Image: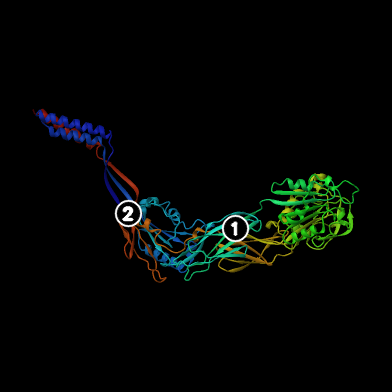
Amino acid sequence: MTDLTFTFAPLLPWPLLAVLALLAVVVLILGAALGQRATILRALGLALALAALTDPSLVREKRDPQKTVVAVVIDRSESQNFGARPAQTEEARKALETALAKFGDVETRFATVTNDASGNDGTKLFGALEQALKDVPPERVGGALLVTDGVVHDIPAKAEALGFHAPVHALITGREGERDRRIELVEAPRFGIVGKEQTVRARVVDTGGDGARAPITVRRDGEQLPTYSPVPGDIVNIPVKITHGGANIVELEVPPAPGEITLADNKAVLTIEGVRDRLKVLLVSGEPHPGERAWRNLLRADANVELVHFTILRPPEKLDVTPASELALIAFPTADLFGRKINEFDLIIFDRYSNQTLLPSVYFDNIARFVEKGGAFLAAVGPDYASTQGLYYSPLENLLPARPDGSLYEQPFRARVSKDGEKHPVTRGLPGARAEPPQWGQWFRQVDADVLKGNSILSGAQDKPLLVLSHEGKGRVALLLSDQIWLWARGYDGGGPNADLTRRLAHWLMKEPDLEEEALRAQAKGREVTIERQTLKDEAAPVTATAPSGAQSQVTLRQSAPGLWRAPLDANEMGLWRFESDGLTALVNVGPANPREFREVASTVEKLAPLAEATGGTVRRLSRASDAVTLPRLVEMTDANRYGGADWIGVRQTGASTLVGVEVAPLGLGLWAMLALLSLVVTAWAWEGRR
C-alpha cells in the first residue's frame, strides 16, 4: 500500500514569507503602473523564488496494513456460576470466536476475569480490558465485547476513560426478572468486650420479591440466638453477647425464596474478636513467707489486672493477744468478697493459705460454686498442704486435682516439663525447657501429692507432679505444689520463665482459646485455610470439612509440634466452612463478611447501558424466555455513530497501517529548479533589453 502526499518545509518562518510575498506584490503593482515590460515574467520569477523558500516536497509512503483488534472479555466471577450462566457464557465465547475468525482483518484478544482471593473487589471487567489492549494503539481498536451478568464494579464514568474510540457491546447472561433474597450487613463490629453485647446491624434485600417478611436466624459459634423477622429493606439491630476471648463467629441466615437463583448470599458471617476489659483478681495470702509479695507484684505490674489483695496478718495459732481489729488498718469486707460479690471476680488465687478458721466454711462452698459456674481458681501451696490443716482438707477437697500424701521434699531440684506438658500450650516451648538440665534456677521445696484428675504439666523432685491443671464444671483449677516460684522472679540461680509461665497460666484459666489443650481451630488467609488440632492424645483423628454448599471432605492432619497437628485446605468456595473432629467444631469464614460479589447477583442490563450507548455500542441479553443462547450477527463497519441494530452488532473497521518506508522528492531544490529560476530572470532581462 502506497500513499502520495505533498509537503512543505519552509526555510524561513511563514510570517516572514508572507511579508516577502506582500512586498513582491507591491513591486509588481508598481511596475505595472509604470508600464514596465515583462511584469508577468517578474511575477513568475518571484513566485518561483518564494516557492523555493517553502521547500516543497513530494512524499511517497510505503505502508503495511494492520489488523483491527477486537477484545472479548469473559466474566467468570463467582456470580457467573449460578444456574445456566456458565453454559451460556461458554456458548457465547465459542460463537464469538467463530464469528470473529471469519474476518481476515480482525485480531481477537480474549481476556477472562475471576474474583481475587479475598472476593471483596467484585467483578473488574474493565481492568482486564485495559490489560488486554495495553500494547495496542487506540487507532487499531475496533471494539470490545463483554460476556457478563451485567453486575460490574469498575465501570468508567465516561467513555473517554476507555482510551479508544470504538463500540463496547455487552452480552448479558441469565434471565430477565430473576429473584434473589440476601442478607446484607450494614454495620459489623470487629471487636467486643467479653461479657458485653455488640450490636450487628443488618437488613434483608429481596430482589423481585413481594415484600413479605423474612426471618433472620442468628447463631453465635453454632449456638442459636433469638430470631428476627424484619420487612425487606428495613435495618434490624441484633444484639450479640461476646462470650469468650478470641474469635466469636456470628452467622445471619435467611430462608430461600421460591425460584431464587442462588443461596450463596442467604448467609452472612462475621467474626467479632472478644477482648477482656480488665481481669479482676482476688488474691488471698496466707502464712507469711519470703515470696509472699511475688504474686502481688506480678499482678500489679499488669495494667489490665484489677487486684483485690486479702492478707492474713496473724495465723490463729499464733500466741498474740492483740485484737484483730487493731491489726487491720481498715475492716476487710470478707462477707462481700466471698459472698455477695464473689461472682464479680474472674480469678481467685490462694497463696499458701491453709485451712484456717478465719474464713468460714460457707465461703469455701461459695468458691466451689464459683468455679463450677465458670470461675477460675489457682492455689500455690506450701508445707501446710501436706498436713491435715492444709487446703485439701477443707470444702475445697473436691475442687483440688491432687491429694497430698503427707510427705514433703526439701532438696534442690529443677522443674521440668512433663510428657503431657510438652503437648500442653501452657508449657510447650517455654524458654530453656529443651536443655538438659533445663536452663532454670533450682527450687528447694515441694509437696508430694497424687494426681486425681487433670494433667500434670510440670514435674519436680523425683519426677513428682509440680503443676497440675484440671477442669471443674464450667471452670478451671490450677494447683502449684511449691511456694518457691518467687526464686525465678528474683533471678536466683539464673531465674526462670516466671513471667511466661504465669501469663500463660492466667490466660488458660481465663479460657483463652489459643491455650486450650483440646481444641480444633481453622484460620483463613485468602482461599488458603489452615486447620489446626491441639490435643494431648498421641494421634489426631481426621477432620471432616463441610463447605458452604454442604459438600463434605476428609482432611488428614500431620504433626507439626508436640500436641499440635496441622493441614492446609484449598477452599474452593467463599462463605462459612465448618470443621469437625472428636466432637470439636471450628468455624471459619473464607472471604469477606459481606462479599461485594454477592451483594447483587440478579443479572441486569442497566449498569452497562450508559457506557455502551456513549460508545455507539449495545447491551442485550443472550437469552430471553429460555436458557438457549441467541447471538446477534457480527459485522464490520466504517466509522459510524451507531454500531448495532435489532439483530446485529458491529465492530469498527479501522484501516490502520504501519509505515515501513518513506521516499521524499524535493521540488524547490536542485539543478532544474535553479535553471527554471535563471531562465525566467534571463528572459525578463532580454525582454526588457529589447526596449
Determine which quarter of the picture holds residue 644: bottom left
Give the residue pinned by disc 1.
271
Figure coloring? rainbow
Q: Amino acid at mark 1?
A: Thr
Q: Residue 318 vs residue 119: left or right?
A: right
Give the residue pinned by disc 2.
655
Residue occupying the point 28% across, 49% down? 3
Viewer-nearest residue: 421 or 88: 421
Determine which of the numbered discs, if any, sits on residue 145 in the image: none
Dot 2 alpha-carbon crowd within 10 angstroms: few under 14, some 14 to 19, many 20 or more: some
Q: Residue 477 vs residue 54: left or right?
A: right
Q: Amino acid at mark 2?
A: Gly
SS class, disc 1 = strand
Residue 673 visible somewhere in the drawing = yes
* Mark sitting earlier along the chain (1/2): 1
Mark 1 and mark 2: Cα distance apart in space: 57 Å
